[in-house]
Amino acid sequence: MSSIDKHTLNNEVNRRRTFAIISHPDAGKTTMTEKLLLLGGAIRLAGSVKAKKSKKFATSDWMELEKQRGISVSTSVMNFEYRNVVCNLLDTPGHQDFSEDTYRTLAAADAAIMLIDAAKGVEAQTIKLFEVCKLRGIPIFTFVNKLDRESQDPLDLMHEIESVLNIATYPMNWPVSSGERFKGIIERESKCLHFFEGRNTTTETVAKIIPLSDKVQIEQCVPADLLSGALDGLEMVEMAGDAFSHEKFLKGQLSPVFFGAAMTNFGVRLFLEKFLDMSPPPSSKGSSEGKIDPFSTQFSGFIFKIQANMDPKHRDRIAFLRIVSGAYEVGLNVKVPRLNREIRLTHPQQFFAQDRSTLEKAYAGDVVGIYDPGIFAIGDSLVENGDFVFEGIPAFAPENFAVVRTTSALKRKQLLKGLVQLCQEGTVQMFVDESRAASDPILAAVGVLQFDVLLFRLKNEYNVECSLENLSFKHARWTNASIDDIARAKEQTDVVSVRDMQGCYLFLFKNDFSLSYFQEKCPYIRLFSSNSSL
Ligand code: G4P
């Protein structure tokens, strides 16, 4: 039992905000992360986040893969305090092939910031990640970035967000032109112009704030045609746009939209201030025993990510735990219901990108890293009292399938061990075709680069050199059909059925045609593209 009193617990949980940034690669996620960390005083120099990444590439052989590919594979957690609020910013990989990692990370977030490039609008990866946020029903903030570059018309952007993503929007501010003629943003609430004076990429300049009623100053700063263009746009929004509804916002049905240019530090502080006013504290989470209240004094949490070899010298495995309720103190004993086993949390770690420090106390909403001696799986619950488990973390339908083979028969056992552990970590998904005894497990991935990571890690961590044989499947769909119905469907079509590591059934299809043929032939079978709906 924790020694932390209820009053302290309530205060600490209430002042936590745990969120992730989602975006299509290149929209400015790294830049935005860095500016938020600068505002929170967690770093002092712009460029630190990128510099930190490249330094680690040079020293870590695991990160070697990222270096070769020039992309970020791992997800980390960054903490900073702003206005007495503890912010846990969950970083997600930018490359779409690692979106499974991002999906899992979103399971640990209470809110998301959707970053959109003002010139490109809603892009493919934004749509996929947005869908996951919607599935979870978490509040989504939108930040339209890069206004200092030639951008789309803001009304068109609003329309695109609403029609493509099917979410209502409420612009909190409105841009005055873009690119070379960008003059800043008009804040709707205060009716003030935040004047964009120029580019400053390193330190923060405080924008000049001019009330729209101060006609003299406004005229000095903004050419009349740009001002009237922006005011016309705003009027349209006031007349035809949605009214703000806090309830809809909390359910993820309405997104407040902010404009800015993260690289030039413009609009970021204004955004952060509003974000902290509006975003919710840690929310309750569904479990086998109903909703678990974050303010409960009993500690509980779940593992949403496992990362091996963060420190190549120690070859360790770290499980990232999102605390759902209560507080953690050094030496807390918890139970892992899946394993029916007690463990003592001795040295949980707090992370700042790849750096870590040992943690004395942590509260609901926080994310901590715990040493994993190879026992945890993604989605595991850790509870101080009781036997309940949290709702699982969804897996999404893979589109790439393969088997791996090793030339050395002596290494088969080692290969299997590696595969099981790496699949528990979520590197790829593993399916078994039970109709063919002793056949190799089928490996499946959302993005093909996941296979590269798998081969790289099998060689470096398990000393098994493997080759990959691609299989010609294109789609996988989960089903909750009975065994009899599955057998009937297999008789009617040439579909392949497999089971995942949780024992759930899936069908594998070679192409779009075989999927729609199956749906036509076997209307009694329901198919799901995520296991969350089973
Ligand atoms: P990502 O993590 O989402 O992939 O994007 P990242 O922050 O790396 O930004 C992608 C590129 O967009 C970077 O340029 C970055 O400087 C630029 N960028 C981000 N925000 C803004 C903005 O508000 N205005 C403008 N004009 N550019 C922005 P790069 O040339 O690819 O990299 P770098 O040489 O600047 O590091």
Image (tube, rainbow, N blue to C red):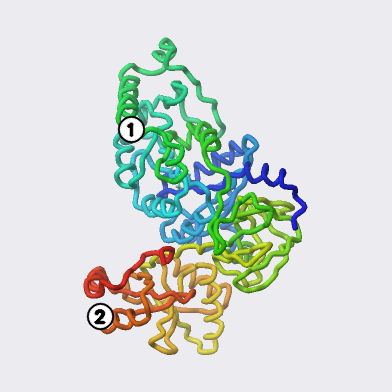
72 displayed left or right of 16: left
Q: Position of residue 487 (x, y in %)?
A: 32, 83
Coordinates of residue 145 in the picture (x, y in percent): 42, 38
- Residue sitting nearer the eye, 16 or 129: 16
How many residues crowd mark 2 within 10 Å: few (<14), some (14–19), many (20+)? few
Residue 316 is at least partly visible in this image: no
**What amino acid type is highlighted by mark number 2?**
Thr
Q: Which residue is mark 2?
A: 493
Taking the image as shown, residue 389 lies to the left or right of residue 484, namely right
Instruction: Tell me the quarter of the image containing the C terminus.
Output: bottom left
**Residue at (47, 22) in percent of width and height:** 190
Residue situated in front as seen by the camera: 42 or 340: 340
Amino acid bearing label 1: Gly
| Mark 2 secondary-structure assignment | loop
Residue 241 tag number = 1
**Tags 1 and 2 in contact by the CB under 8 Å rule?**
no
- Which residue occupies 34% across, 75% down? 507
